[in-house]
Image (cartoon, rainbow, N blue to C red):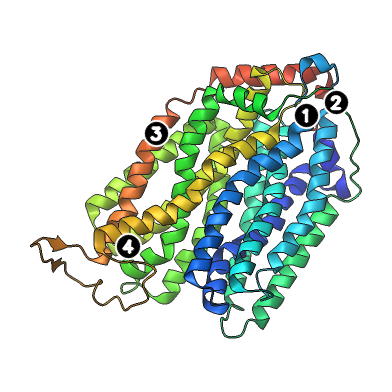
């Protein structure tokens, strides 16, 4: 029944409807990630203090708003067994779609607030980041929660995720198109481009969720947030997963933050500008396309085995690159690109693991309805600090090892050289190129080892996962005929 609610819209297949929601997010979010810092630093001339104040406040809000909005979304579903009231799965799905129909267009409007100067740069930076992230969080939470609410079987969830990756890859084309209109000195064309993208996103969210009505189903008794957190603290697989995912989020954003730096100091004098631009552009699209293959592997071997294999692959490639050294240009190009592609691909598979955790939470705590959005929010609460740790730890390591301060505007001639320099204490100082290379290979080696350790403790796979899914489906066996398989 739940899948039919989406599929009936405009006679389009369910997977197309669900996947298109990813398109309407990605066409905006990729442009935001690529240009918002450059816009405020180079166009609006924000000062360093205001920039870091904005990032600090954003770090706090970015971590807290996921569990906050997740709780506000799902607290109505967290009824106890004693209440005797049950809310059906179709009603939950309708509630998710209603939230998307309201907040999707608002997300697109908040995206436009970045590209017009309307306040002091520091104030605008802070307000735009928090406002944009708030609507993005609501959209992401409800969209991800639908993955757990629409289907229980691994096959159906993998199919839904497949089309999400396909449409996200299509949405990433906005990055390539943005190169044609991006100009720091003449912002008009880029602003028009952003308005067109936002209008497409608004139309997409509106049409996709058109004519969806939300039924009401009041509950008489609910658990408190404190009780829910106590239940979550006893959820062993959740705790091991967030430990692993914190490292994964850190590594994903480390690659994004330092990708241009690695290109500049490791490859700029050895490859053409067009090759560098191609590597940068393909790194945004390839993870989505590559994920289509990973999802087919998940159907055959299971998500746990595929994710573990990607961790071993990351470790092996990094060790090979370390042994080969920084002078193997072709191998270095492949490694820089593949490192980001495989890391981002792993991130996209982990939503399937969270949906399995939703099932286990449902079974362990005997819930009447799965708290999908809330669990996604709690995962984000623990893992999103990795977004801020990535640039902080990366710049600190680079400065400690080479003496290069990324925020220093002085020429780099005294830092970058072909050969190491002899320091006053008689030791050889490494060059910036050497520092970037060691940062490039040792960060994924360290991350892979930590992730393999925590992932080995994760037990929600194999027979245990099948048992959980069987118990999750058992309360709804009478409605199984209503579910439309993809």
Mark-to-mark CA distance, 1 and 3: 35 Å
- Asked whether disc 4 touches disc 2, contact meaning CB atoms under 8 Å apart, the reply is no
* Numbered disc 4: secondary structure: helix
Which of the pair 485/367 is nearer the observer?
A: 367
* Numbered disc 2: secondary structure: loop
* Numbered disc 1: secondary structure: helix
Kindly indicate the quadrant of the structure image that contains residue 303: top right
The crowding category of the residue bearing disc 1, from other C-alpha atoms within 10 Å (few below 14, some 14 to 19, many at least 20), is many
Kindly indicate the quadrant of the structure image that contains residue 275: bottom left
Mark 4 or mark 2, earlier in chain: 2
On screen, 22 above or below 184? above
475 relative position to 419: left or right: right
Q: Which mark is residue 452?
A: 3
Q: Which mark is residue 219?
A: 2
Specify the quadrant that holds the C terminus.
top right
Mark-to-mark CA distance, 2 and 1: 8 Å
Which of the pair 104/158 is nearer the observer?
A: 104
The crowding category of the residue bearing disc 3, from other C-alpha atoms within 10 Å (few below 14, some 14 to 19, many at least 20), is some
Residue 454 drawn at (x, y percent): 42, 31
Asked if one can make out residue 341 in the rendered structure from this viewpoint, the answer is: no
Question: What residue sits right under mark 4 in the picture?
Answer: 330
Question: What residue sits right under mark 1 in the picture?
Answer: 77
Query: Which dot, 3 or 2, sits closer to the camera?
Result: 2
Asked if one can make out residue 10 in the rendered structure from this viewpoint, the answer is: yes
- Asked whether disc 1 touches disc 4, contact meaning CB atoms under 8 Å apart, the reply is no
Mark 1 or mark 3, earlier in chain: 1
């Amino acid at each position: 029944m739940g899948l039919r609610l989406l599929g009936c819209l405009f006679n389009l297949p369910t997977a197309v409807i669900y996947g298109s929601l990813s398109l309407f997010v990605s066409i905006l979010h990729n442009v935001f990630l690529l240009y918002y810092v450059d816009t405020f630093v180079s166009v609006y001339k924000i000062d360093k203090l205001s920039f870091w104040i904005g990032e600090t406040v954003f770090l706090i809000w970015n971590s807290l708003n996921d569990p906050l909005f997740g709780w506000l979304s799902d607290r109505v579903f967290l009824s106890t067994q004693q209440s005797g009231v049950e809310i059906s799965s179709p009603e939950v799905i309708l509630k998710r779609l209603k939230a998307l129909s309201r907040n999707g267009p608002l997300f697109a409007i908040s995206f436009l607030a970045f590209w017009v100067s309307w306040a002091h740069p520091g104030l605008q930076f802070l307000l735009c980041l928090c406002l944009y992230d708030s609507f993005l969080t609501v959209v992401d939470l409800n969209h991800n929660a639908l993955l757990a609410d629409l289907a229980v079987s691994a096959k159906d969830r993998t199919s839904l995720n497949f089309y999400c990756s396909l449409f996200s890859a299509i949405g990433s084309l906005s990055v390539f198109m943005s190169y044609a209109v991006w100009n720091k000195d003449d912002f008009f064309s880029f602003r028009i481009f952003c308005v067109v993208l936002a209008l497409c996103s608004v139309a997409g969210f509106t049409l996709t969720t058109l004519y969806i009505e939300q039924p009401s189903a009041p509950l008489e008794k609910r658990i408190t947030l404190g009780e829910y957190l106590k239940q979550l603290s006893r959820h062993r697989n959740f705790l091991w997963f967030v430990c692993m995912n914190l490292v994964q989020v850190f590594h994903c954003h480390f690659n994004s933050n330092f990708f241009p730096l690695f290109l500049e100091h490791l490859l700029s004098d050895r490859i053409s500008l067009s090759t560098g631009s191609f590597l940068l552009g393909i790194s945004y699209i390839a993870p989505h396309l590559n994920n289509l293959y990973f999802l087919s592997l998940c159907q055959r071997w299971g998500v746990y085995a595929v994710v573990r294999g990607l961790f071993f692959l990351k470790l092996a490639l990094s060790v090979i690159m370390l042994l080969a050294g920084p002078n193997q240009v072709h191998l270095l190009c492949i490694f820089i690109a593949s490192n980001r592609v495989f890391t981002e691909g792993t991130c996209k598979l982990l939503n399937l693991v969270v949906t399995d955790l939703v099932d286990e939470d449902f079974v362990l705590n005997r819930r009447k309805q799965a708290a999908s959005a809330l669990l996604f929010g709690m995962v984000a609460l623990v893992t999103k600090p990795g977004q801020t740790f990535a640039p902080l730890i990366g710049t600190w390591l680079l400065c400690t090892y080479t003496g290069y301060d990324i925020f220093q505007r002085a020429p780099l001639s005294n830092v970058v050289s072909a050969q190491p320099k002899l320091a006053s204490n008689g030791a050889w100082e490494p060059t910036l190129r050497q520092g970037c290379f060691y940062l490039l290979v040792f960060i994924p080696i360290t991350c892979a080892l930590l992730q393999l350790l925590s992932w080995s403790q994760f037990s929600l796979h194999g027979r245990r996962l099948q048992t959980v899914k069987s118990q999750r489906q058992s309360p709804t066996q009478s409605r199984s005929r209503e579910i439309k398989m993809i």
